[in-house]
Amino acid sequence: MTAEPADADREAAAQREVAGGFFVLLAVVQVALAVAVLPLLRRARRHAGPYGPKPVPRAVVATVEVLLVAAALAIPAALVAEAAPWWRFAHPAASFAGLTAVLLAATTLLVRLAPGYRSTLGPLGAVAGLTTLAVGLDVVTGARLQLNGVVGYSALEGGRYAGLGTVGLGVFVAAALLSAGWLAQRVRRGWRPTVMVIVAGPPWWSSAARTWAPTRSARSP
């Protein structure tokens, strides 16, 4: 009778310890990548004059592209990691970090090997599609990965007990809009508004409804 509430309490305590470090690390990495990309963008095109900066080596560009893809997939990877009981191990933080790293490497490799990776919008469409799929499947199955999740919300704080949290909602809406934009670019111009409405419309309203629904989850302690 008490096993499930005790396990949920243990998960919530572990979430509080891990969440802060995860978001700080993610923010530092994303800011560092944004700063590193600036000189690459400046040297992306050949200088008009006789003298100018040398082109960026292709290996450097490819490495930065993969790192940007990995950074974009960090939130959905951390969400899917909640499917495993990482908080039950002796070192919860290390267990969560290892599991998230494995999922992040797998999804990044999947995007890298996707057929349209070399196209301009290929990586964007793949990342947005995977993110929409990860968060969307969690929502339609009860949003159980959100409660006491590192990228979700904590039952100890009592802000939410069901639905999508702030991070999940923001990531899901952004990914749905980008997915719709990627799909719209693959049809004729006249059909693009229709694709945007069909693809991006339902996810926005369904996620908003679930986010603000005053319901409790069975996993709450």
Image: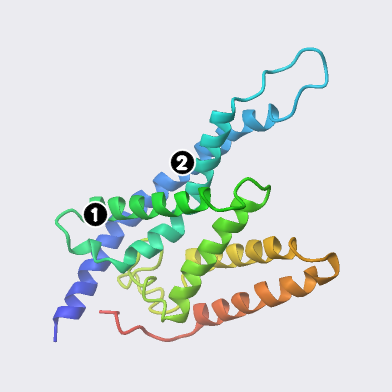
Quarter in which the C terminus is drawn: bottom left
In front: label 2 or label 1: 1
The residue tagged with tag 1: helix, strand or loop? helix
Secondary element under disc 2, as helix, strand or loop, is helix
Q: How many residues crowd mark 2 within 10 Å: few (<14), some (14–19), many (20+)?
A: some
54 displayed left or right of 138:
right
Give the amino acid at mark 1: Ser
Question: Of all residues shown, which one is farthest toward the right?
Answer: 190
Residue shown at the point (62%, 25%) measured from the top left:
56
The image's mark for residue 95 is 1
Q: Nearer the viewer, residue 35 or 141?
A: 141
> Is residue 112 depicted above or below 64 in this figure?
below
Q: CA distance from mark 2 to mark 1?
A: 20 Å
Coordinates of residue 208 in the picture (x, y in percent): 57, 77
First in sequence, mark 2 or 1: give its number.
Answer: 2
The kind of residue tagged 2 is: Val
Residue at the far top in the pictured view: 51
Residue 197 is situated, as x and y percent measured from the top left of the image, at: 72, 75
Is residue 127 visible in this depiction of the protein? Answer: yes
Q: Quadrant of the N terminus?
A: bottom left
Position of 71 compared to 34: left or right? left
Q: Is residue 171 visible?
A: no
Labelled disc at residue 29 = 2
Q: Is residue 106 above or below residue 81?
A: above
